[in-house]
Amino acid sequence: MTRWIRHLTVVVAAAALLTQAGCDLTRFTANSTANMFARAGGALQHHFDYEMVGDALPGSIMQLEGVFSVIPDNEELGVTLMRAYVSYTFGWVEDELQRAQDAGDFEEEERILGRARLLYERARNIGIHLMRLRDPNIDQVLEGGYEGYVAYLDQHYAGEDDVPLLFWTGYAWGSAINAGRDDPEMILSLPYARAAVEQAVEIDESYFDYSGLTFLAVVNAALPEALGGNPDRARELFERALELTERKFFTVQLSYARTYCVQVQNRDLFVSLLREVVDGGDPEPDARLANRIARRRAIRWLQRTDQLF
């Protein structure tokens, strides 16, 4: 982790110097390291220290932003940056939000919620930018209505290489909507976020530990039926995600408990799922960091049990 950040800092500094010198090597230098950034970012999932990663991520994001400003047409780097924004906001900013909620600090809760929305929107906007690079007509497609948008995704995004862009754009978009759920215009755009993730799942449901299935389960569980929610479908998707991840990716159990169980008022399942997370140990090194984040959240949600049921 530290070596990656140090190397990234050197690359950004070198790129800045080359830019000042007016040298065409700037883009070459940045592009030659973009693949390394993507590979190194995945190593964070193995890390054991929640605080250390959280302290490092904001600086890493700004460094990635610096390189992306040099090569804004590099899709792999853009997806890496989107993932970094989403991971940091979910894992650390939303953790602060939950603490503010538990403390009853409504002013702080509103401030953090606004920050989360902006960070998620930045990730979503990077995704739209990358889609625009593929086809400038994406803006007209988005303005043309939902059915045309779904048909467009089906026609233009149908391969394995399309999955990361689809998933992170949809996930970031949906998370921004959740953070801005008091804004009616944001809610109206949810089908577009959902469609991007659905298309990613259709191509490869296993991507990022089956997180697309979990995302769609959360949407079905959290929304009222009048807005497209479906608790039965949510439970089916959650159970499938649990089976496919062998119950080793604790974000599934956490999401299952805090959305579906609360919505249908199933206290026993709520407690059982969260206890599974808290007592689950370290079953999957590739998901170690995500599981530690889930465990922190699960402890707090368990403390809310009597308030919720």
Image (cartoon, grey):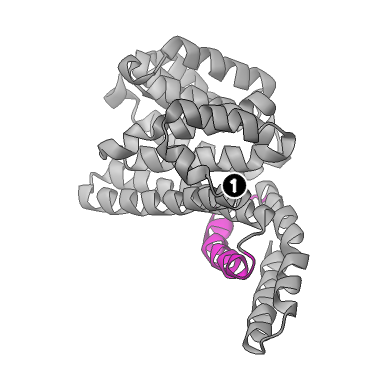
The answer to whether residue 197 of the structure is visible from this angle is no
Q: Residue at x 41, y 24 (%)?
A: 259
In the image, what residue type sits under mark 1? Asp
Taking the image as shown, residue 163 lies to the left or right of residue 129, namely right
Residue 134 on image: x %, y %: 62, 48
The answer to whether residue 307 of the structure is visible from this angle is yes
Taking the image as shown, residue 49 lies to the left or right of residue 42, namely left
Q: Residue at x 40, y 43 (%)?
A: 176
Residue 219 on image: x %, y %: 44, 25
Q: Quadrant of the N terminus?
A: bottom right
Relative depth, front residue between 93 and 228: 228
Which residues are the magenta region?
47-71
Q: Identify the residue under disc 1.
A: 135
Q: Which is the main secondary structure of the residues drawn in magenta?
A: helix
Circle 1 Cα neighbour tier, 10 Å, few/some/many (<14 / 14–19 / ≥20): few
Residue 306 on image: x %, y %: 30, 23
Q: Quadrant of residue 9?
A: bottom right
Q: Residue at x 67, y 39 (%)?
A: 162
